[in-house]
């Protein structure tokens, strides 16, 4: 596997089941009449039902263990996959975990607050906290620091996994590393790719993947499907994140402004809220490929992927979709996912 030499100097604790497979979506491609569609199955990384965050947590937990932390703190939406997997990683490594859940989705219903990831958080033994605002990253992080201070007073050694920008993007290194894995798999199979489509939220997965590909000399187009904020705001976030990765690795960023490609045409009406194209993507992938997507990340990013291949109208274009997981979140949206069955 190709490597980025400075990556090896960063503390990492293996947690993910890797390499995850790349599968061809034959049935979906045939149904759409498009070129080859592939999926990178990062929903199969293990760690309490899998997802992209397993790769990211390897670096956060590596740093936490290096600092001899005994308690992990993390904040996220009520149905946060990151929080669920942090709780699982903490349990696996013998650490305590405190999760702060933010109210980002209005009128989500009772199941959203008690099923899916929330249920797994509790099963995994996390201590739960609430934060009433949903679009206040700095405030959510500040509240985590208050909880951390209380834990220190009680004799604990807490470690915060931050939400807001302005911190070393350790999690992004998981996808710098994943870029090498993908290129290695493509070399083994002889497959060529024109595009990769990935959900773009916190920016760690999108920026890390893009940074890794460009560092290794790959010009594959990476399309970030906005799932949290509109394209203009996300553009700056990804640009800044790539610069932060470069600083962390003590190198120059190989990512140019032209490399940062985003679409927000499947984002409305906002984070964690369903729309017709997301509903269709969940439906098509389930019925044609037995592939489960969630309403928050993979449903919206697959909707963007399907829109792109339809508009391209080319049977020669080859596209890889990064499945970032999120399956438990389906159960938090059960009232909205009563899919009509075919006659």
Image: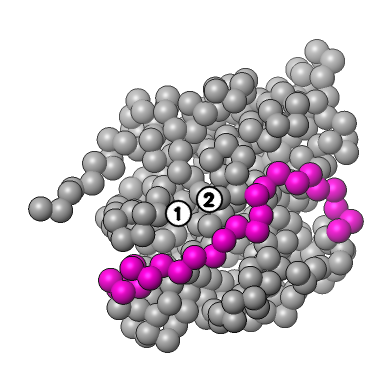
Residue 189 pos. (x, y %):
59, 77
Q: Is residue 56 left or right of residue 305?
A: right
Quadrant of residue 148 within the rendered picture:
top right
**Earlier sequence position, callout 1 versus callout 2:** 2
Q: Residue placed at 42% from the left, 28% from the top?
A: 115
Whether label 1 touches label 2, CB < 8 Å? yes
Residue 182 pos. (x, y %):
64, 68
Q: Residue placed at 81% from the left, 68% from the top?
A: 4
Q: Nearer the viewer, residue 27 or 35?
A: 27
Q: Nearer the viewer, residue 307 or 231?
A: 307
Look at the picture and state if 103 lies above or below 291: above
Q: Residue placed at 36% from the left, 45% from the top?
A: 273
Q: Is residue 229 left or right of residue 237?
A: left
Quadrant of residue 336 within the rendered picture:
top left
Of marks 1 and 2, the one in the foreground: 2
Q: Residues within 10 Å of mark 2 (few under 14, many from 20)?
A: many
Residue that badge 1 annotates:
298
State the extent of the magenta-drawn residues as a range.
Answer: 8-32
Say which mark, if any, is on residue 43.
2
In 3D space, how far apart are the residues under numbered discs 1 and 2 (Cα atoms)? 10 Å
Q: Residue furthest front?
A: 188
Residue 21 seen by the camera: yes
């Amino acid at each position: 596997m190709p490597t980025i030499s400075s990556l090896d100097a960063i503390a990492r604790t293996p947690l993910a089941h890797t390499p995850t497979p790349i599968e061809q979506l034959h049935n979906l491609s045939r149904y759409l009449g498009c070129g080859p569609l592939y999926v990178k199955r990062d929903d199969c990384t293990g760690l309490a039902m899998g997802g992209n965050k397993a790769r990211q947590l390897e670096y956060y937990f590596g740093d936490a263990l290096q600092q001899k932390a005994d308690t992990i703190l993390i904040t996220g939406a009520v149905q946060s996959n990151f929080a669920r997997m942090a709780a699982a990683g903490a349990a696996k490594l013998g650490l305590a975990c405190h999760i702060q859940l933010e109210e980002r989705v209005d009128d989500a219903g009772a199941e959203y607050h008690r099923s899916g990831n929330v249920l797994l958080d509790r099963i995994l033994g996390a201590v739960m906290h609430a934060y009433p605002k949903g679009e206040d990253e700095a405030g959510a992080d500040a509240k985590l620091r208050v909880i951390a201070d209380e834990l220190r007073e009680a004799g604990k050694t807490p470690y915060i996994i931050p939400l807001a920008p302005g911190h070393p993007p350790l999690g992004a290194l998981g996808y710098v590393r994943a870029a090498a894995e993908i290129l290695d798999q493509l070399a083994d199979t002889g497959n060529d790719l024109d595009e990769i489509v990935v959900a773009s939220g916190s920016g760690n997965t999108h920026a890390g993947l893009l940074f890794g590909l460009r560092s290794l000399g790959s010009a594959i187009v990476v399309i970030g499907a906005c799932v949290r904020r509109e394209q203009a705001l996300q553009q700056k976030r990804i640009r800044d994140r790539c610069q932060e990765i470069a600083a962390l690795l003590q190198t120059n960023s190989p990512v140019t402004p032209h490399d940062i490609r985003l679409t927000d045409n499947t984002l409305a009406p906002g984070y964690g809220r369903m729309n017709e194209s997301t509903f269709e993507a969940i439906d098509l992938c389930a019925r044609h490929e037995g592939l489960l997507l969630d309403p928050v990340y993979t449903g919206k990013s697959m909707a963007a992927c399907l829109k792109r291949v339809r508009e391209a109208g080319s049977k020669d274009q080859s596209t890889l979709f990064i499945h970032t997981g999120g399956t438990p979140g389906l159960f938090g949206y059960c009232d909205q996912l009563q899919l009509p069955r075919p006659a």
